[in-house]
Image (cartoon, coloured by chain):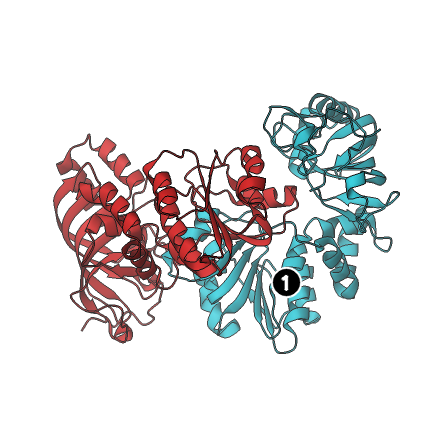
Chain colours: A cyan, B red
C-alpha cells in the first residue's frame, strides 16, 4: 500500500508532504516528509545523480574545505534534517537524474512517462522529497553527486525523459534553459522581426534558432552581443541565424539606441532578453516597437527597472516574465538542438567534454 | 529661436539634455541641462506644484528637521546642482503640475495638448529638466511644494491634461495608478473570469470596475482582500463589482488555494495583482488557469519569485510586468471614476479632503 491512511487530502503541489511549518508549500517548508513510497498522486524515482546548483555547491564546497567526503556528509546531513537537498544558506537546490520506479494511481494515465524511464527533474530540489541511502561520489569540478536514494515528484512537478541520442551533459545544458526556445517558438509569428539580446549564450542561440525557423524568410532576426568574436556570435552569423548583429553592451542603452536605425529600423515585434547581467531592461524596451512584446528570460531582470523603464520613456509594450516552464518545453528545446547541427556541435563541444 | 544650434541631434528620450556623465539617459544622468527653452521636440511648462514622492520627501523632511524653509532651500539646491529634482539618497523624484507654455515644432501636430492646458507630468522628476525661480510654500503634511519655475517634457515623455470636473488631489490619486485600469480594460475579454488580488485598494477598485464592465454579465469577477470590512471591500460587494470575495492573506498561498474550488472553480483567465506587499507571487499564479495571464501591477513583485514560482508548480501561464504606461491610460483611468459614482465617492472621500 503506497497511500498511507493519514494522507486524507493529496495536494497536487505536495503540501500533504509538508512537516513544518504548517501551511507552507514544499518549497517554503523547513522540512518535508521524505518517506520513499509514492502516494496516489506522486511519482517515485530511484535517484542516480544530484546536480547541485552552482551557488549552493560553491557554498558547500567552501564550508567543507574542498573535501569530497565532507561534502558528501554535508549533503547526507541536510537531507536527513530537512527531507530535501535545500541549502539553508543559499536557499537553492538543483535537480536530479534518476529512473521511474512507481507511478501513483492518479497519474497512471500519463503518456509521457513510464516505469523504467530515465528522467531529469525540472523542478528544484528545494521542493523535492529526497531519501538518501548513500553518497557514492562527489565531483568537485562539476557539482554532480552520485548517490543511491529515492525522490518524489508531485502531481504538479515537471520532468523530462532523457533522450538516448544526446550526451547527458548536453541534454542537461539544454534542459536548463528549455523555457526560452519554447516561448520564442510560441511568440514568433511568420514574417516577424525578432531581436535576441545576449544572442551568443546558451539560451540565446536556441532562441535565435527558433526565431529564425518561425519568422521564416520574410522575417528578420537581429542579435545583440557584447563581442562579435565569440564562437557563439560567429556561429550565428556564419549559419544565417541572424540577419544582423549589433555589437554593444546592452547595459549602455544609448549605445544600443544609436545602432537601431541601421539594424532595426522598424524596431522588433519581439525582444528576447537572454543576458546574464543586470541593467539591460531599458535597452530591451528601446528595441521593441509599440504594442510589441519584450520577453525577459534573464533571471538578472529587475521588475521595477522594467516597469519604471517603460513608463519613463513612454513605451507601450507588453513585458513578460520568463516562465521556466511551458507545456512541452523540454521536447521543443531538445528538438531545436537536433534540427540545428551547427548549434548541436557547439553544445557538444562546450558541454559534452565534461562527461 | 528655441532651438540652439548646438543641439544637432534631438533625442526623443532627451539624451541631448544630458550634461554628465556622457552616454547616460536623463534618468541615470547626474546632471541635465535645465535651460528653460523648448527645443524643437520638447514641451516647456510653467510649473506650479511639485509632488515630491513620499520616500524622497520623508528623507528630505528628516534631513531638514521638519522646517519648511529648510526643505525649500534643499530642493532649490538639488535642482540647481543637478538640473532636476532627483533625490540622491532615495533615487526617486515625483511629478509636477503646471501649464503648457510652448510646444516645439516637431510636436506641433499633437492633438492631446495645447498651449495653456493644465497638466500633470506622468514621468518621474528624476528625468525632467527643471528650472526653479523660487519655492513659495512647502506642505509638510502632503509633500506638495508650490513653486515658480519651468520644466521640460521630452518627446517620449507622458503627461495628462488635468480634468476640470475632478478635484486635483482625486485626479492625482487616479493618475498615480492609471496603468492598472487601462491594462485590465485591454486584457479582459467578454465572458472572462478575472481575479483581482488586493481588490480593495486604489488600483484594485479601478481594476475591478474595468473587469466588471468588460467581462459583462457572462463573466465573473472575484476579489481577494485581507479583510472584508474595509470601506473598499464593502463597496465591491455592495455595488456588485465582484461576484465573490476571497478573504485571505495572499502571502499564504495554501490559504488562497483552499478557497479556490468554491470561489474560482475553473480558475481565472486573468489575474491582476494590485497588492502592496511582497510574497504573493505564488498565490497569484495559483489563481490562474493554464494559458491564462497573470498581470503583476504591484511594484512589490519579485521577478525571480514569479519566474521560479511558476516553474516550481508547473504552471504554464503568461506573466506580465505591469507597465505604468499604456496609450490613453490617463483618459481610461479618469473615465473609470466618472462612470462609477460609488468609486468616485470613495476616492473623493478619501483623497479630496486633503485638498
Circle 1 residue = A186
Residue A273 in which image quadrant: bottom right
Q: Which residue occupies 18% across, 41% down?
A: B353
Chain bearing tag 1 is A
How many discs mark residues in the rendered view? 1
Q: Determine the secondary structure under disc 1.
A: helix
Can you say whether A225 is above or below B167 in the image?
A: below
Can you say whether B226 is above or below A218 in the image?
A: above
The x, y position of residue B307, in whole percent, is 58, 46
Q: Which residue occupies 56% across, 45% down?
A: B285
Classify the position of the N terminus of chain A by image quarter: top right
Q: Which residue occupies 30% across, 47% down?
A: B93
* Residue B177 in view in this figure: yes
Residue lying at the far right of the rendered structure: A116
Left or right of B159? Residue A299 is right
The x, y position of residue B169, in whole percent, is 22, 48
* Residue B34 in view in this figure: no
The x, y position of residue B256, in whole percent, is 54, 36
Residue lying at the far bottom of the rendered structure: A218
Left or right of B40? Residue B69 is left
Can you say whether A122 is above or below B131 in the image?
A: above
Q: Residues within 10 Å of mark 1 (few under 14, many from 20)?
A: few
Residue A54 in which image quadrant: top right
The x, y position of residue A195, in whole percent, is 56, 65
Left or right of B138? Residue B243 is right
Can you say whether A68 is above or below B341 in the image?
A: above
Which sits in the foreground, A254 or B154? Answer: B154
Amino acid at each position: 500500500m503506497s497511500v498511507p491512511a493519514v494522507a486524507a487530502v493529496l495536494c497536487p503541489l505536495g503540501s500533504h508532504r509538508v512537516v513544518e511549518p504548517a501551511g507552507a508549500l514544499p518549497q517554503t517548508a523547513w522540512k518535508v516528509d521524505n518517506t520513499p513510497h509514492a502516494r496516489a498522486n506522486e511519482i517515485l524515482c530511484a535517484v542516480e545523480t544530484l546536480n547541485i546548483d552552482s551557488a549552493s555547491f560553491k557554498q558547500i564546497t567552501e564550508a567543507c574545505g574542498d573535501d569530497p567526503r565532507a561534502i558528501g556528509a554535508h549533503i547526507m546531513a541536510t537531507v536527513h534534517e530537512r527531507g530535501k537537498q535545500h541549502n539553508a544558506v543559499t536557499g537553492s537546490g538543483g535537480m536530479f537524474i534518476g529512473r521511474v520506479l512507481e507511478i501513483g494511481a492518479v497519474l497512471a494515465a500519463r503518456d509521457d512517462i513510464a516505469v523504467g524511464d530515465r528522467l531529469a527533474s525540472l523542478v528544484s530540489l528545494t521542493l523535492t522529497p529526497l531519501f538518501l541511502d548513500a553518497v557514492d561520489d562527489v565531483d568537485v569540478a562539476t557539482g554532480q553527486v552520485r548517490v543511491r536514494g529515492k525522490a518524489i515528484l508531485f502531481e504538479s512537478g515537471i520532468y523530462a525523459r532523457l533522450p538516448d541520442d544526446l550526451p547527458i551533459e548536453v541534454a542537461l545544458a539544454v534542459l536548463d534553459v528549455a523555457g526560452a526556445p519554447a516561448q520564442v517558438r510560441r511568440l514568433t509569428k511568420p514574417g516577424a522581426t525578432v531581436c535576441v539580446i545576449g544572442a551568443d549564450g546558451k539560451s540565446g542561440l536556441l532562441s535565435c534558432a527558433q526565431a529564425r525557423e518561425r519568422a521564416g524568410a520574410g522575417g528578420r532576426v537581429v542579435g545583440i552581443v557584447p563581442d562579435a568574436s565569440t564562437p557563439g556570435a560567429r556561429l550565428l552569423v556564419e549559419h544565417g541565424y541572424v540577419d544582423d548583429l549589433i555589437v554593444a553592451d546592452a547595459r549602455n542603452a544609448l549605445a544600443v539606441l544609436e545602432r537601431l536605425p541601421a539594424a532595426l529600423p522598424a524596431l522588433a515585434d519581439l525582444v528576447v532578453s537572454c543576458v546574464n547581467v543586470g541593467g539591460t531592461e531599458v535597452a530591451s524596451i528601446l528595441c521593441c516597437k509599440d504594442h510589441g512584446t519584450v520577453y525577459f528570460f534573464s533571471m538578472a531582470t529587475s521588475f521595477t527597472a522594467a516597469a519604471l523603464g517603460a513608463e519613463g520613456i513612454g513605451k507601450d509594450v507588453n513585458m513578460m516574465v520568463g516562465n521556466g516552464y511551458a507545456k512541452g518545453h523540454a521536447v521543443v528545446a531538445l528538438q531545436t538542438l537536433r534540427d540545428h547541427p551547427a548549434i548541436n556541435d557547439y553544445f557538444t563541444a562546450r558541454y559534452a567534454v565534461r562527461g
